[in-house]
Image (cartoon, rainbow, N blue to C red):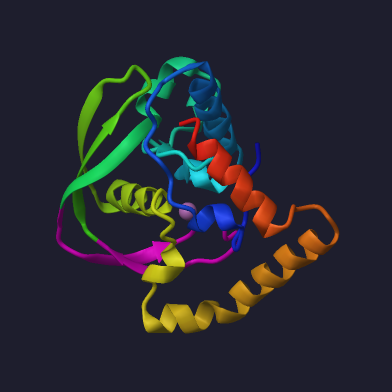
């Protein structure tokens, strides 16, 4: 498992709800958790590792010591999350593990109420504000193929153009070298995976 960078098609592919919490899903969650800590991210969504499932991991405590502790998975892994309510607005700088080095201001709701399931299949209702609220909104967007570059203001979009062009060039170069499969092959794999959620 590895993190895919923009413009990998998985980042635009709508994730399907998870219907069973089995050994494979738990393994995906563990590997995503490990990748998130390795890259010192606040969160990581399954489409960022090429899995079109409504699954994400968040490190809201910012505690990097929990890395290998599977008991912490219950507070780190969230399944089929939905935003029930949002209030207020706040502009702040945002980054994404699929766009290394690109930080721009993004407007988000200041407070959100989220419903999600943990790895035990228990329904949770979570109230978040400020940075955790931003992380929830960013990661849930990933599950719908929405990226923070879509939500930047006009100044941020303009300032990102050259960097995005570089990401696109690097991606197509990697495809030409055979390091990344052609998009049509990736899209077939994603479609096949959705049938197994
Ligand atoms: Co992201």
Instruction: Examine the rendering and report whether any part of residue 14 can be seen.
Output: yes
- Give the camera-side residue of 139 and 60: 139
Is residue 102 shown above or below 184? Answer: below
- Give the residue displayed 50% in from the left and 30% down from the top: 196
Q: Quadrant of residue 100?
A: bottom right
Where residue 95 appears, as percent x and y from the top left, is 48, 59
- Give the residue displayed 51% in from the left and 46% down from the top: 47
- Give the residue displayed 65% in from the left and 36% down from the top: 1
- Give the camera-side residue of 18 and 76: 18
In the rendered image, residue 59 lying in the magenta stretch gets the answer no
Instruction: Examine the rendering and report whether any part of residue 97 can be seen.
Output: no
Is residue 79 shown above or below 185? Answer: above
Where residue 90 appears, as percent x and y from the top left, is 24, 65
Where residue 136 appears, as percent x and y from the top left, is 33, 47
Direction right: furthest residue: 177
- Give the camera-side residue of 68 and 25: 25
Q: Would residue 126 appear left or right of 188 to someone viewing this image? A: left
Where residue 162 appears, as percent x and y from the top left, is 61, 80
Q: Quadrant of residue 175?
A: bottom right
Q: Which residues are magenta?
A: 86-108
Q: How many marks?
A: 0
- Give the camera-side residue of 61 and 124: 124
Is residue 176 shown above or below 188? Answer: below
In the rendered image, residue 104 lying in the magenta stretch gets the answer yes
């Amino acid at each position: 498992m590895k993190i895919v960078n923009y413009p990998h098609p998985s980042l635009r592919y709508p994730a399907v709800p998870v219907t069973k919490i089995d050994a494979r899903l738990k393994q995906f969650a563990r590997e995503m958790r490990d990748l998130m800590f390795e890259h010192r991210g606040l969160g990581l969504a399954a489409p960022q590792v090429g899995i079109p499932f409504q699954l994400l991991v968040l490190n809201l405590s910012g505690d990097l010591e929990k890395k290998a502790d599977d008991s912490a998975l219950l507070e780190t892994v969230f399944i089929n999350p939905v935003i029930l309510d949002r209030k207020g607005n706040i502009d702040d700088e945002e980054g994404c593990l699929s766009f290394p080095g690109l930080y721009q201001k993004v407007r988000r709701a200041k407070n959100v109420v989220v419903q999600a399931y943990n790895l035990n299949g228990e329904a949770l209702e979570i109230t978040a504000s400020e940075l955790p609220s931003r992380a929830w909104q960013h990661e849930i967007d990933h599950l719908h193929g929405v990226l923070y570059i879509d939500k930047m203001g006009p100044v941020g979009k303009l300032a990102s153009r050259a960097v995005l062009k570089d990401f696109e060039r690097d991606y197509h170069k990697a495809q030409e070298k055979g390091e990344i499969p052609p998009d049509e092959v990736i899209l077939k794999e994603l479609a096949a995976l959705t049938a197994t959620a």
